Image (cartoon, rainbow, N blue to C red):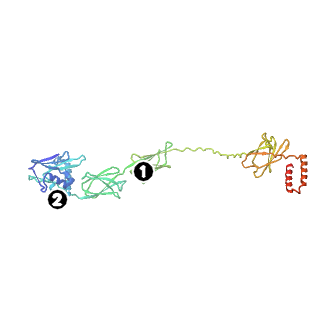
Amino acid sequence: MKIKEVALNEIYWSIKSWNVEQQANDYLKKKLGDTSRYFAKCNVGHGYYSWDTEVIADWKPKNEASTTEEPLIAQKLGEVSTEVHAKLSAEPDLAEHILEIPNEAYIFYKITPDGQVDIIITGWGFRNFKKTPPVQIKTPPKKPIHPTTIAFAIDDEKLPNRPFTIKASWTQKPNMATTDAEGNFVIKEEEGVSIEVIDQETQKSFSFVVTNEKSEHIFDLTERTDLTVMATLDGEPLNGETVSIDYAGKHYEETLVDGKALFSAITLRTGEPLKAVLRDETKETILSADNNVVHFEFVTPEEPVEEPVVEEEPPVEEPPAPVTARLTVVDAAGQPIKGAAFSLRQGDMACDGQLDDQGSTLFVVDGFMTSQPLTLTLTTDKGPMEPIEFSLDEGETEYLLQENAPKKESRAGEILLAILMLAALAGIAWLFREGIWELSKIIYKNLF
């Protein structure tokens, strides 16, 4: 975009070591780097010089600036001059030639959307053919530097290690900063420079202008709010009881009136927990201007209903069932002895009864010992029978007994025959003593 054009016979090139046009543009970028953006690109045409800018904008010549814009343009030109001299500190003459222009009509400016001034310089490195002297863009004289202390405070107490943003009027770029362990931050600026600081946590903004005296600016971040504690008992306001508050290292107490306790003008501390205590209940919250009410709701506990104590009777232990056994008695032929009366004896223990039609009876085992025999005596309609002895076995419940077989009665003939045989044998005893004696024992045993 062409921003200015003049005839060749109006101005002439003054930087002898550079060829005008392309070489001059290239050398300028090489020498000044990013600062070269303030200098328009030079072109040589047929009978004219022109200057272009890559940025399309509504540039206006400096002589059209308002009285409020002029100081800002002058300040910006001074900043550009300072940058050029800094980058060409080893070539001060070259810096002077670059900052030389035919007149102020070769300076253009615009106001950026953020209210700052931007400039573009044409005719740099040229002089007038006319006798009017060229304009030299000068670096403004440095003003004395003055130290200024910045601090933030809550309730007149400086805040150490407090992060904030700081920006000076001579630059668009804000910088992050932090107060020291004592809550201070020192800047050194020229008199008249406007400073803006923004507290990082609250985003509160403060401004001041640097003076020619050593000064301190303490910015108050104190915020206060009222805290209300409300309490009810069974839905009715609770009165006369004390509510205690612990917050940011401080302790407060107030009395409930109509169910409310008011704590006035408590200093807010961002992120600090608040603890409220009433009776044996504690509530915690983060206090803020929008969160400043605490509720307590108590309910009278119901009296417990006492249940009658019922004493439990100890369980009645049932005696163990007696151990019984079945006793069956059969005759010599194996037939049940029906209906016979019986008597069962063991020492002092006795059990009497009568056998049933199966020749059986039940008797209680308890009391009898397994280590001694029991004696069973039966009595039938023919009279008493010979006693039968038996022993109990542990865990046995069935006993089968058989009467003793009766001995054979000796007949008279048989006895006589036996006597005769013995007499006959006696006569020959001297022949067969041992054999006859054994035979006689057998006969006697079988007959008697």
Q: As shown in the figure, which amino acid type bears the numbered disc 2?
A: Pro
Q: Nearer the viewer, residue 334 or 193?
A: 334
Q: Is residue 303 left or right of residue 443?
A: left
**From what the image shows, is residue 95 above or below residue 66?**
below
Residue for point 85% across, 56% down: 434
Q: Is residue 11 left or right of residue 444?
A: left
Q: Secondary structure at mark 1?
A: strand
**Mark positioned earlier in the residue sequence (1 or 2):** 2
Task: Specify few, some or many for label 1: CA neighbours under 10 Å numbering under 14, 14-19, or 20 or more.
Answer: few
Q: Which residue is mark 1?
A: 273
Q: Tell me the quarter of the image containing the N terminus.
A: top left
Q: Nearer the viewer, residue 258 or 220?
A: 220
Q: Position of residue 8 (x, y in %)?
A: 9, 49
Residue for point 77% across, 42% down: 360
Q: As shown in the figure, which amino acid type bears the numbered disc 1?
A: Pro
Q: Position of residue 387 (x, y in %)?
A: 82, 47
Q: Is residue 79 visible?
A: no
Q: Which residue is mark 2?
A: 92
Q: Is residue 304 visible?
A: yes
Q: Is residue 432 left or right of residue 300?
A: right
Q: Secondary structure at mark 2?
A: helix
Q: Is residue 274 left or right of residue 442?
A: left
Q: Position of residue 16 (x, y in %)?
A: 12, 56
Residue for point 85% across, 43% down: 383
